[in-house]
């Protein structure tokens, strides 16, 4: 990594630049929380030092309805980030060819055209957005003209705005901002592209002059993180920028990390697979086994669950089996007191529940006992049942 031949960074007040950027954001957009404003500020600043980062965090700007300010926020991001590349009506080939060792910042409005029901034909762009979070994950394409396989870079920071949640593969790698409509008394300055964008682009140039002069320092930074694993990968560039700025920004950055990652957990950021696994635990209680039909009935009995409307006819035995097989859980033919039927044994779920589900769903001690009879030839000659403590009797 080579620094730009510019020693002006020593005279640039990075904290003051971040303050100015945050002030510009909150001038034109109502952010849901102060921590969200800090997070967007740091994400924009981090785009100017992309060559220094091993991961390219996404910025997801989502809202439950229209007119929540997501497009206006994307306008301000576009005006202040590094090398904005708006992907509206861009072909996947054009987007791929625009990503270099010093990539642009990809901006996607109306992201339902990429991930939602209208997403047909956008597989290449979805693949790029999924793969481009980590450096050295190129796309492979065969060039028939040269007879060679090409490696096309995918690494680039990206901001996506849309209504509703993005796929787990995106939000797990993103700073997620949940926009909302302005409430009574909340006002912002009108944003006029021709009038206001030049000042914002100058702010972007100042951010670049500050951060580009210290790419080697930023590349080697290992800031202490308040989170772990993928969340740490996603937030590390933002915290590194905050630590580089100093003043109040290191504390604000870590407060934003904790606030927004906690929001993601508290707002039900759970995959469909994990939701099903968790709901199966509730459905089983302490029953040692359940016929598939009974398990489905119990899952669909909760009107607030997704299972009654999971497909045209709700969750089916085939769909249930497909999802559970990802956790190495399979149905079996079991002899119940009511007769022989396809079903699931509780013991087959215990390992997955322990690995993936929170440990606060202990069945009550007054749960009923259900008797399961072994099948002929299964090597068991006695009747098997579980008491309320889960012990064999």
Image (cartoon, grey):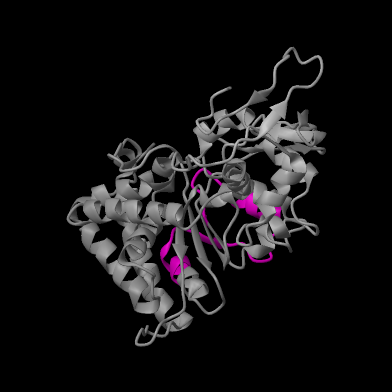
x, y percentage for residue 163?
58, 68
Residue 67, relative to residue 173: is it above or below? below
Q: Nearer the viewer, residue 286 or 300?
A: 286
User: Which residue shows up at 44% across the image and 42% down it?
Assistant: 360
Answer with left or right where residue 174 lies relative to residue 18. right
Residue 186: within the magenta?
no
Chain part drawn in magenta = 76-105
Q: Give residue 240's position: percent from left, percent from top.
A: 31, 46
Number of marks drawn: 0
Furthest residue toward top: 379
Left or right of 27 in this view: 302 = right
Residue at (75% x, 41% y) in the render:
292
Q: Nearer the viewer, residue 68 or 4?
A: 68
- Residue 277's spot in the image, x, y percent? 60, 42
Q: Residue at x 70, y 40 (%)?
A: 323
Q: Quadrant of residue 209?
A: bottom left
In reply to whether residue 100 is colored magenta, the answer given is: yes
Quarter occupied by the C terminus = top right
């Amino acid at each position: 990594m080579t620094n730009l031949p510019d020693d002006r960074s020593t005279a640039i007040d990075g904290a003051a630049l971040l303050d100015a950027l945050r002030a510009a954001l909150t001038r034109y957009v109502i952010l849901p929380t102060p921590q969200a404003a800090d997070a967007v500020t740091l994400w924009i600043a981090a785009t100017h030092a992309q060559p220094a980062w091993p991961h390219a965090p996404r910025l997801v700007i989502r809202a439950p309805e229209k007119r929540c300010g997501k497009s206006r926020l994307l306008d301000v991001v576009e005006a202040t980030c590094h090398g904005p590349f708006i992907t509206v009506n861009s072909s996947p080939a054009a987007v791929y060819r625009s990503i270099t060792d010093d990539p642009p910042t990809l901006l996607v409005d109306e992201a339902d055209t990429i991930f939602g029901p209208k997403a047909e034909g956008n597989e290449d762009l979805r693949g790029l957005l999924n793969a481009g979070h980590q450096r050295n994950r190129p796309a492979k394409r065969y060039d028939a003209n040269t007879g060679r396989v090409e490696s096309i870079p995918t690494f680039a920071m990206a901001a996506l705005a849309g209504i509703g949640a993005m796929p787990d593969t995106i939000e797990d790698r993103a700073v997620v901002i949940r926009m909302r409509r302005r409430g009574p008394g909340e006002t912002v300055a009108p944003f006029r592209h021709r009038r206001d964008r030049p000042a914002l682009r100058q702010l972007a140039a100042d951010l670049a002059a500050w951060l580009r002069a210290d790419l080697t320092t930023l590349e080697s930074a290992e800031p202490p993180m308040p989170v772990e694993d993928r969340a740490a990968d996603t937030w590390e560039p933002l915290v590194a920028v905050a630590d580089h700025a100093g003043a109040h920004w290191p504390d604000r950055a870590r407060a934003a990390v904790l606030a927004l990652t906690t929001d993601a957990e508290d707002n039900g950021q759970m995959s469909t697979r994990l939701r099903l696994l968790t709901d199966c635990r509730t459905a089983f209680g302490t029953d040692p086994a359940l016929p598939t039909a009974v398990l489905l009935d119990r899952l669909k009995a909760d009107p607030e669950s997704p299972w009654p409307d999971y497909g045209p006819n709700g969750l089916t035995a085939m769909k249930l089996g497909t999802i559970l097989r990802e956790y190495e859980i399979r149905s079996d033919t079991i002899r119940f007191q009511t007769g022989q039927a396809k079903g699931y044994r509780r013991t087959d779920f215990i390992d997955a529940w322990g690995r993936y589900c929170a440990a606060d769903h202990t069945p009550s001690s007054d749960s009923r006992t259900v008797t399961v009879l072994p099948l002929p030839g299964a090597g068991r000659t006695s009747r098997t049942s579980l008491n309320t403590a889960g012990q064999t009797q």
